Image (tube, helix red, strand yellow):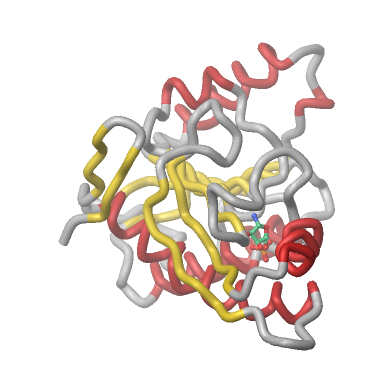
Amino acid sequence: MQQAMQKKGAMNVAVFASGRGSNFQAILHAIDAGTVPAQIVVLISNSAHAGALETARGHGIPAMHMSEKQFINEQEFSNRLLAVLREHQVEAIALAGYLKRVPPQVIQQFRNRILNIHPALLPFFGGAGMYGHHVHEAVLASGMKVSGATVHLVNEDYDRGAILIQRTVEVAAGDSAESLAAKILKVEHEIFPIALKALAENRIKIEGNKAWITL
Ligand code: GRF
């Protein structure tokens, strides 16, 4: 419950999530354990029913339902989003199962400060329509023997920002989209906090369209 009071020197993070928010919880655990020098200052969800909203409220984190549909156009949406991010002095954004495109103005203002987690080994099995079970079904259909999770920086090119960290899992005979998703989710929960920690500690080195986490 580190959220009640703001921690000095910790990176202020906004989490965007559309669903149950298990990655959000993994990040919260890592912060509570003192592993990641950050604090979640606001949780934003495009879905009023996202489990992530409940989790945030349970932690005393401001939780907001904000969707482009509530605004007359994307410009208005992104103006409001940017205002909320400013209000909470947000320094970085973690997309933890966020199914919407981040408006370009937000990407511009948070250049190399937005992380996304994807349940496959990018640059494969990413892009439009590649979310949830669609990803795992495509992997199974491809016959590949490994899949995994990727944390990458977000740029204007959907799922194509510089890769920061990946972890593989084996695709076994008899795996279903569900069993593969479960295996991958486990490694997602490990690598997202690692990437966030690196960002908070200024250990991300960017060269052109590539990025590394340094020691
Ligand atoms: C995860 O598989 C993540 O990779 C993808 O959406 C899913 C979100 O799961 N982007 P959760 O809401 O964090 O449990």
Taking the spot 27% from the left edge, 50% from the top edge, the residue there is: 212
Residue 53: give x, y in percent of width and height: 70, 55
Left or right of 32: which side holds 16? right
In front of the other: 197 or 7:
197
Q: Quadrant of ligand 1?
A: bottom right
Taking the spot 65% from the left edge, 79% from the top edge, the residue there is: 171
193 in relation to 44, above or below? below
Can you see residue 52?
yes
From this viewpoint, which residue is outermost toward the front?
143
Can you see residue 8?
no
Image-quadrant location for residue 35: bottom left
Left or right of 110: which side holds 145? right
The C terminus is located in which quarter?
bottom left
Residue 9: give x, y in percent of width and height: 22, 50
Residue 41: give x, y in percent of width and height: 47, 48
Taking the spot 64% from the left edge, 47% from the top edge, the residue there is: 126
From this viewpoint, which residue is outermost toward the left?
215
In front of the other: 141 or 91:
141
Residue 58: give x, y in percent of width and height: 63, 66
Q: How many marks?
A: 0
Taking the spot 26% from the left edge, 55% from the top edge, the residue there is: 213
